[in-house]
Amino acid sequence: MRAVVQRVSSAEVRIDREVVGSIGNGLVVLLAVGSGDGPDDLAFMTRKLVGLRIFNDSDGKLNLSVADVGAEILLISQFTLYGDCRKGNRPSFTRAAPPAEADETYQKLAEELRARGLRVATGRFRAMMSVSLVNEGPVTLVIDSKKEFH
């Protein structure tokens, strides 16, 4: 499972000009589910997103989590994070999970985050979406449950 996480002051996702999800202060999480991702990957990503300390404390240090500051999450499915561009000019997406499997895992992650008391807005799986955000910091991180990114 792979995610690009951005700390934001606001964000929204639109489908056909209609806002389907929006948040104020929080995290935009662009999520890709990889082929073979299972319960351990889901648990890792849940723990990491809930506990990631990328909000400022009173001293201005990145020391607080989304849960600590009462922030929100906008979770967007984005299989293209598994795009392999090493050969040629057209990305290969063979490492991305099949759509039904990816959607199920995406929905489970949203449920797990909500079960931990977070407000989670989402996009719509397999829809053409427009995402707007105000990145604060800017703070942007890449998280990979297989630890392929460091």
Image (cartoon, rainbow, N blue to C red):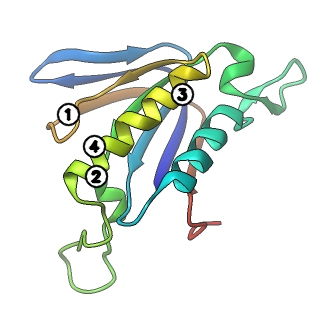
Cα–Cα gap, marks 2 and 1: 20 Å
Q: Is residue 124 visible?
A: yes
Single out the mark in the foreground, 2 or 1: 2
What label sits on residue 99 in the rendered view? none
Cα–Cα gap, marks 1 and 4: 15 Å
**Name of the residue lying farthest toward the right:** 59
Residue 91 horizontal/vertical position (percent): 23, 72
Residue 65 horizontal/vertical position (percent): 72, 28
Q: CB of mark 2 within 8 Å of CB of mark 4?
A: yes
Q: Which residue is mark 3?
A: 113
Q: Amino acid at mark 3?
A: Leu
Q: Earlier in the sequence, mark 3 or mark 2?
A: 2
Q: Amino acid at mark 2?
A: Glu
Residue 125 horizontal/vertical position (percent): 22, 37
Q: CB of mark 1 within 8 Å of CB of mark 3?
A: no
Cα–Cα gap, marks 4 and 3: 16 Å
Q: Which residue is mark 1?
A: 129
x 9%, y 23%: residue:
16
Cα–Cα gap, marks 3 and 2: 19 Å
Q: Amino acid at mark 4?
A: Asp
What label sits on residue 101 in the rendered view? 2
Single out the mark in the foreground, 1 or 4: 4
Cα–Cα gap, marks 1 and 3: 22 Å
Mark 1 crowdedness (10 Å alpha carbons): few <14, some 14-19, many ≥20: many
Q: Earlier in the sequence, mark 4 or mark 3?
A: 4
x 25%, y 68%: residue:
93
x 83%, y 22%: residue:
57
Nearest the viewer among 40 and 110 is 40
Cα–Cα gap, marks 2 and 4: 6 Å
What label sits on residue 103 in the rendered view? 4
Mark 3 crowdedness (10 Å alpha carbons): few <14, some 14-19, many ≥20: some
Q: CB of mark 1 within 8 Å of CB of mark 4?
A: no
